[in-house]
Amino acid sequence: MTHATNAAVMRTSNRKLILDLIRRGPISRAELAERTQLTRASITQIADELLEAGLVEPCSTDCNPDAGTAPGRRRTMLALKHNARFFFGVHISRRRCRVGVVDLYGDVLTDDELLLDGHTPESTADAVAGIIRSQMAQLPYPKEQFLGIGISAPGPVDHREGIILNPPNFDAWHNTPICAMLCERTGLPALLEKDTNARALEEKYFGAAMNISGFMLVQIDEGVGSGVMIRDSLYRGTRGLGTEIGHTTIRYDGPPCRCGGRGCLENYLRIPALLAGSRFADWAQLTGCANEPDAARILDCAAEYLAAALVNAFNLYDLEQVFLSGEVAACPQPLLDRLTPLVSARVLSRSSRTPVSACSGRLPVRTGAMAVLYDFFQPRE
Ligand SMILES: [Zn+2]
């Protein structure tokens, strides 16, 4: 779509812009006008629509003790209404699938697990649809309040068509039109996002990146993946594949990679590659021995590999920060201690901010739901 400017599109966009500001905490109509540069009349009209739709509710200034309102002068603030709308989140990993409901605040109301062992995509879709129906029946809200199903899955995925394309080590799921399958079985609309993009969105909406408009999330476990937010929007690239930092090269004459490239970061930095030939079984064990020479050597290498790729990312996207996710985020410090000076010394635009930090905790059901939550709140695109 080119930049359509007709009235209906503008109205939807302004409505989402307002809703997105209210989401961040109670806010007055005057403050909304100031923040959006919309007229007071437009704000009043949109606020009335949101109140009528039951999405927001008035609350007293007590909701926001920092508002600085003079005593005796009460302002009515607008807040997102609890239990106004709900979204299903389906988080698909290679071994299991988590299915649950989240509300507009990202709180998880229900959470069930399904092991994928022995399941085909078809039988998984049947089982997930069954869980969705039973969770909906458990909750005391009408069906109309459930707006859709967000799905996160290993990439690459076709976000527009809702198809899981060809993720490695996930052969049975190649070319699965998961959105159509779940929509057909539940009657709810579904949206798909690759897991690293969904994690970046979760960090932006509910985690440590809430006030950061440009950042990259790098997930390091059995593979290395990424998601980038630029000016508060998810960056999907021109064909919707997003970013793949794992398949950027850190050694131009390195060994061939399954992607067709050479010396790709993933082949050096994925945890099984880091630990190959060592006495360490996993990341927790490695970092637990961080002061011993053999562990320190591995961590030094990991920091050098990652720094090379991250400096490129900082310089390409003009990022404010990078967040580490995946297995490494559970015990990130020994890596961060090595990584921070390397990255700080090499990036072009130096800022006072620590360049790399670990993600805050994730909730798999919420990660899944991010595709629909983002669609609900995102004012642009
Ligand atoms: Zn590659």
Image (cartoon, grey):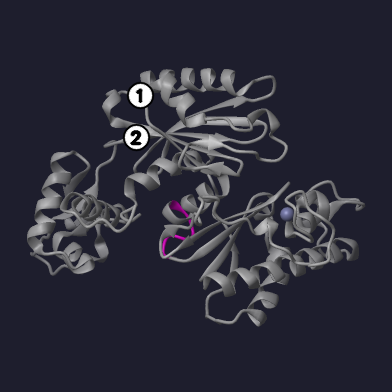
Q: According to the image, label 1 marks what residue? A: 139
SS assignment at label 1 = loop
What type is the residue that disc 2 sits on?
Phe
- Foreground disc of the pair 1, 2: 2
Q: Toward which corner of the image does residue 311 lie, by quadrant?
A: bottom right
Whether residue 207 appears in magenta in the rendering, the answer is: yes
Question: Residue at image x 40%, y 43%?
Answer: 106
Rendered image: mark on residue 122: none
* Image quarter for ligand 1: bottom right
Pointer 2 residue Cβ closer than 8 Å to ligand 1:
no
Q: Is residue 221 above or below residue 140?
A: below
Q: Which residues are magenta?
A: 206-211
Pointer 1 residue Cβ closer than 8 Å to ligand 1:
no
Q: Residues within 10 Å of mark 2 (few under 14, many from 20)?
A: many
* Residue 41, position as x, y percentages in the image: 7, 59
Q: Is residue 45 visible?
A: yes
What type is the residue that disc 1 sits on?
Leu
* C-beta proximity under 8 Å, tags 1 and 2: yes
Q: Is residue 287 above or below residue 90?
A: below
Q: Is residue 105 visible?
A: no
Judged left or right of residue 77, residue 184 is: right
Whether residue 92 appears in magenta in the rendering, the answer is: no
* Residue 144, position as x, y percentages in the image: 27, 27
Judged left or right of residue 212, residue 342 is: right
SS assignment at label 2 = strand
Q: Toward which corner of the image does residue 117 lie, by quadrant?
A: top right
Q: According to the image, label 2 marks what residue? A: 86
